[in-house]
Amino acid sequence: MSKHYDQAYFDRWYRDPKHRVKSPLVLERKVAMAVAMAEYYLGHPIRSVIDIGCGEAPWRGFLKLLRPRVDYLGLDSSPYVVEHYGVARDIRLCRFGDLEVLRFDRGFDLLICSDVMHYVPGAELQRGLSGFADLCPDGFGFLEVMCRGDDFVGDRQGFIARPAAAYRKSFAEAGFTACGSHGYLSRGLREDASALELGAHD
């Protein structure tokens, strides 16, 4: 059965209390954590954010509360989202694989890709990831993914149960090194992190 990211989908998973995966309070804490981690490693307040697979852009409001002047860009593959919220919430139409070639006039301080990649087929996933280093060359990545063995509540249609090691390898090849809590350092930030932060082994 094909999957449509239309109004019914977002009503079910983001607004209906019976099915909603996370409450606004949980998301608010997550956004605060991502911003704090990014700014710790950057050494300054975030100025720009790219949100890949942003949906209706629920991150945007909380980001703007914390950093009212932040330059936000959302990307999503849903025509419904772009038609209804594109102008008001700074969202552009984009499939994940398009990131292989899609570029902008600057790099971003914070790259967000939350609850997206475990629905993306393998070949498209690798194409999209190959563009992450150019989109966020000296910034911080918040890459939240569900993996094989994770017991999560939410949309399981189209879920691809990859092992965590596969994502670690793919993210490393894309130029991002894990530093904990779904946080990843670009090559430009990695050199200032300690061995223990990066999970290095003797």
Image: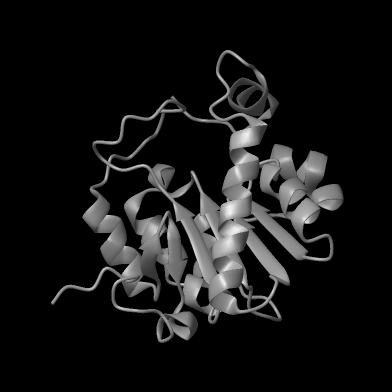
Q: Residue 72, position in %: x, y?
A: 74, 61
Front residue of this view, candidates 153 and 197: 197
Q: Residue 118, position in %: x, y?
A: 39, 44
- Count the marks: how many? 0
Q: Residue furthest left?
A: 202
Front residue of this view, candidates 97 and 129: 129
- The quarter of the picture where residue 103 lies is bottom right
Q: Can residue 139 be seen in this snapshot? A: no
Task: Write the residue at 61% across / 79% down.
Answer: 43
**From the viewer's perspective, is residue 186 above or below residue 159?**
below
Task: Write the residue at 72% across / 41% down.
Answer: 81
Front residue of this view, candidates 36 and 147: 36
Front residue of this view, candidates 15 and 199: 199
Q: Residue furthest right?
A: 88
**From the viewer's perspective, is residue 177 above or below residue 31?**
below
Q: Residue 137, position in %: x, y?
A: 53, 81
- The quarter of the picture where residue 28 lies is top right
Q: Is residue 54 left or right of residue 145?
A: right
Q: Quadrant of the N terminus?
A: top left
- The quarter of the picture where residue 159 lies is top left
Task: Write the residue at 32% across / 40% down.
Answer: 160
Q: Quadrant of the C terminus?
A: bottom left
Colour setup of the view: one colour
Q: Is residue 47 left or right of residue 156?
A: right
Q: Can residue 143 be seen in this snapshot? A: yes
Task: Write the residue at 31% across / 43% down.
Answer: 147
Q: Residue 7, position in %: x, y?
A: 70, 27
